[in-house]
Amino acid sequence: MGNCIVVVQFDLPKRTQEQAVAGGTGSAPIYRGLAGKGLIRKDYLNGETGTGGVYLWESRAAAEAWFTEARIAELTQRFGVRPRLTWYDTHVTVDNVRGETRVNGVPISIAAE
């Protein structure tokens, strides 16, 4: 089974770098606490077309357990606009930090170019 990526987008104006850093570091402890619940990584987004996050989960089931309707309602209340969630299954990962390619989470051998 592959990992799951969820892209969460809010239709909000781009924040300043200071606002983006403050918002991200302020909520980071919530997501650090999800390591045991399947969250591998979260990146905060701040762009011309909105703000949000990219979440990498161990599985779709773990992502679905987090992104419930109650969670969506909480995010809507916090940000004042309902987020759009886009779901992706990811079966192949190139991880340059670890120096490996994984298929469904398992490292495989592929010669570097």
Image (cartoon, rainbow, N blue to C red):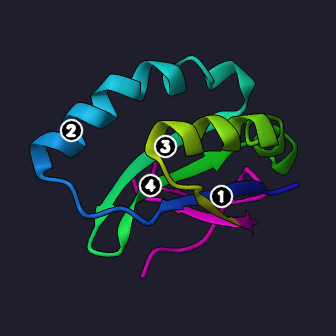
**Residue under label 1:** 5
Distance Cα–Cα, label 4 vs label 3: 10 Å
Q: Secondary structure at mark 3?
A: strand
Q: Position of residue 70 (x, y in %)?
A: 76, 35
Distance Cα–Cα, label 1 vs label 3: 10 Å
**Stretch of the chain drawn in magenta:** 87-113
N-terminal-most mark, 4 or 3: 3
Foreground tag (4 vs 1): 4
Foreground tag (2 vs 1): 2
Foreground tag (3 vs 2): 2
Image position of 90 (left or right of 17): right
Distance Cα–Cα, label 2 vs label 1: 22 Å
Q: Residue furthest bottom?
A: 113
Give the camera-side residue of 62 and 91: 62
Q: Amino acid at mark 3?
A: Lys
The residue at 72%/65% (across/down) is 87
Q: Amino acid at mark 4?
A: Gly
N-terminal-most mark, 4 or 1: 1
**Residue under label 2:** 21
N-terminal-most mark, 2 or 1: 1
As for residue 98 lying within the magenta part, the answer is yes
Looking at the rendering, in which quadrant would you find the C terminus?
Answer: bottom left
The residue at 47%/48% (across/down) is 80
**Residue under label 3:** 42
Give the camera-side residue of 6 and 26: 26
**Residue under label 4:** 52
Position of residue 86 relative to residue 33, above or below, is below
As for residue 19 lying within the magenta part, the answer is no
N-terminal-most mark, 1 or 3: 1
Say which mark, if any, is on residue 93: none
Foreground tag (4 vs 3): 4
Position of residue 9 relative to residue 36, above or below, is below
